[in-house]
Image (cartoon, helix red, strand yellow):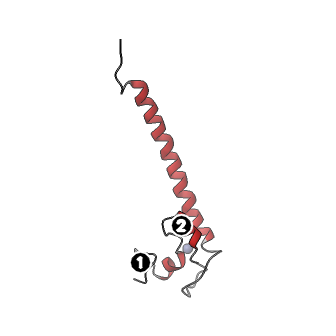
Amino acid sequence: MKSGYPNITHTAILITMHACMQGVRTKWVYHMTFLVNSACHIWGNRAWNTEDMSRNNWWVAMVTFEDGWHNNHHAFEYSARYDWER
Ligand SMILES: [Zn+2]
């Protein structure tokens, strides 16, 4: 008996790989979130005189899709943009 491509083994492997990648993705997002909230309160420049110790950190921004502009975020909490004052 010849089996077609999407047989049960392939499906099981794909489901397992997908589940593993979901774990990797979730871990990555948590680590990057914690990185922003720790490193961006220690290292970087302060463009705005906010009451917290938030800072803009370029290397965190590089790996977090601009989330590293944390001082901007604290200065303009309700803005959806990190790199503008609105
Ligand atoms: Zn913060």
Mark 1 secondary-structure assignment:
loop
Query: Could you tell me which residue is drawn at 34 percent across and 22 percent down?
Result: 4
Q: Quadrant of ligand 1?
A: bottom right
Query: Could you tell me which residue is drawn at 39 percent across and 83 percent down?
Result: 86
- How far is mark 1 from mark 2, CA to CA? 22 Å
Residue sticking out furthest to the top = 1
Residue 15 placed where, x, y %? 43, 35
Relative horizontal placement of residue 49, taking residue 81 as reference (left or right): right
Q: Residues within 10 Å of mark 1 (few under 14, many from 20)?
A: few
Disc number for residue 62: 2
The mark closer to the camera, 1 or 2, is 2
User: Which quadrant of the figure has residue 79?
Assistant: bottom left
In this figure, which residue is indicated by the disc labeled 1? 78
Q: Quadrant of the N terminus?
A: top left
Residues 27 and 1: in front is 1
Amino acid found under the numbered disc labelled 1:
Tyr
Query: Could you tell me which residue is drawn at 57 percent across and 58 percent down?
Result: 31
Does the beta carbon at disc 1 come under 8 Å from ligand 1?
Answer: no
Q: Residues within 10 Å of mark 2 (few under 14, many from 20)?
A: few
Amino acid found under the numbered disc labelled 2:
Met
Q: Is residue 76 above or below residue 17?
A: below
Q: Is residue 1 above or below residue 15?
A: above
Residue 51 placed where, x, y %? 57, 85
Residue 29 placed where, x, y %? 51, 57
Going from N to C along the chain, the mark reached first, 1 or 2, is 2
Mark 2 secondary-structure assignment:
helix
Query: Could you tell me which residue is drawn at 58 percent across and 63 percent down?
Result: 34
